[in-house]
Image (cartoon, rainbow, N blue to C red):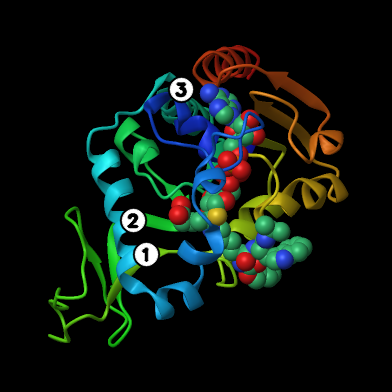
Amino acid sequence: MRIFVITGAGISAESGLGTFRDKDGTGIWARFDPMKLATPEAFARNPSEVHAFYNARRRNLLSAVPNSAHFALARLEEALAERGGSLALVTQNIDDLHDRAGSKEVIHMHGELFKVRCVACATTIPWREDLGLEDQCPSCAQIGSLRPHVVWFGEMPMRMDDIYLALYGADLFVAIGTSGSVYPAAGFVSEARALGVRTCEINLEPSDNASHFDDKRYGKASEVVPAWIEETIATM
Ligand code: BJW
């Protein structure tokens, strides 16, 4: 069995990382304007403000730990591999909680908070501290050329070829903790459906794409994901 899983901010919510668009109005984009913080134009206009936003989130991530949903997905990857199947785990999250929970192959389509990239020489560098305009690229020595290694609105998400390859080969499509409002990720479920692949949504509440899912399970990711995975492994 080949399972394709796309995760979003909801899977990391119980690890203390904020989501972007919760219906109760507490999401990150209810407090901060994405057009001022998450576009290449915003970074060109006011890099210090964008650095401050990502520095705060980087500090928050340093003290966060994976929850039972992240661990269960690592277990699913192992169980599928033991039975000759595979898990394609694609995340929109820039945190590293899947990696820390033990998932071996994670596609970070919106980038990684613990990496920065040099706009002068394109080198990607591991980075866990605050980032500022005074910092120097360790590769080309340019000062002020480092940016967060994340995908902003209007930029191309990463590893799209690998994602579509996995999507086209999947037997089951599962979306976990995502509102289904940001493309291209929000469009994956319709593409899976068009291919005749069974689809499952796990979220706190119905997402924008709820009508495209065959199986819908609502509740906290920390409870619903491990239960779904135990059930899936038992039937494999
Ligand atoms: C729980 C829970 C719990 C809570 N348990 N669940 C008009 C139409 C169509 C498209 C466009 C358009 N205008 C512009 C576009 C394109 C644009 C886009 O989609 N905009 C929309 C807003 C309309 N997209 C882009 O620009 C993308 N690039 C692109 O399209 O390139 C061209 C292209 C063409 C063709 C092919 C390929 C590419 C880039 C998008 C970049 C998104 N960047 C961000 C910021 C990243 C860095 C950072 O983190 O700061 O990515 S925005 C933000 O949203 C972040 C997320 O990854 C992304 C998705 O959010 P997610 O994960 O779904 O979180 P939420 O908060 O929305 O949902 C959480 C859910 O969890 C909720 O439903 C809760 O209920 C639930 N939940 N607690 C389970 N405990």
Q: Where is residue 159 in the image (x, y as percent from the top left)?
A: 52, 64
Q: What element carries label 1?
A: helix
Res. 122 visible in picture: yes
- Amino acid type, residue under disc 1 in the picture: Val
What amino acid type is highlighted by mark number 3? Ala
Q: Residue at x 47, y 73 (%)?
A: 42
Q: Quarter of the image containing the C terminus?
A: top right
Does mark 2's beta carbon lie closer than 8 Å to ligand 1? yes
Q: Which mark is residue 92?
A: none
Residue nearest the observer in this picture, 23 or 69: 23
Marks 2, 3: nearer the viewer: 2
Q: Mark 2 points at which residue?
A: 54
For marks 2 and 3 on the same chain, the one whose residue lies earlier in the sequence:
2
Left or right of residue 34, residue 123 in this image: left
- In the image, taking residue 66 as reference, residue 220 lies left or right, namely right
Q: Position of residue 13 (x, y in %)?
A: 47, 29
- Direction from residue 193 to residue 232 in the image, left or right: left
The structure residue drawn at horizontal position 41% and vertical position 80%, both measured from the top left corner, is: 44
The answer to which of 174 and 9 lies nearer the viewer is: 9
Q: Quote the CA–CA distance across marks 3 and 1.
A: 34 Å
* 3 or 1: tag closer to the N-terminus: 1
Labels 3, 1: front one: 1
Residue on which the image places disc 3: 72
Q: Which of the image's four quarters has the N terminus?
A: top right
Look at the numbered disc 3 and say if its residue's Cβ is closer than 8 Å to ligand 1. no
Q: Mark 1 points at which residue?
A: 50
Distance CA(mark 2)–CA(mark 3): 28 Å
Coordinates of residue 202 in the picture (x, y in percent): 66, 26
How far is disc 2 from disc 1 in space, using C-alphas? 6 Å
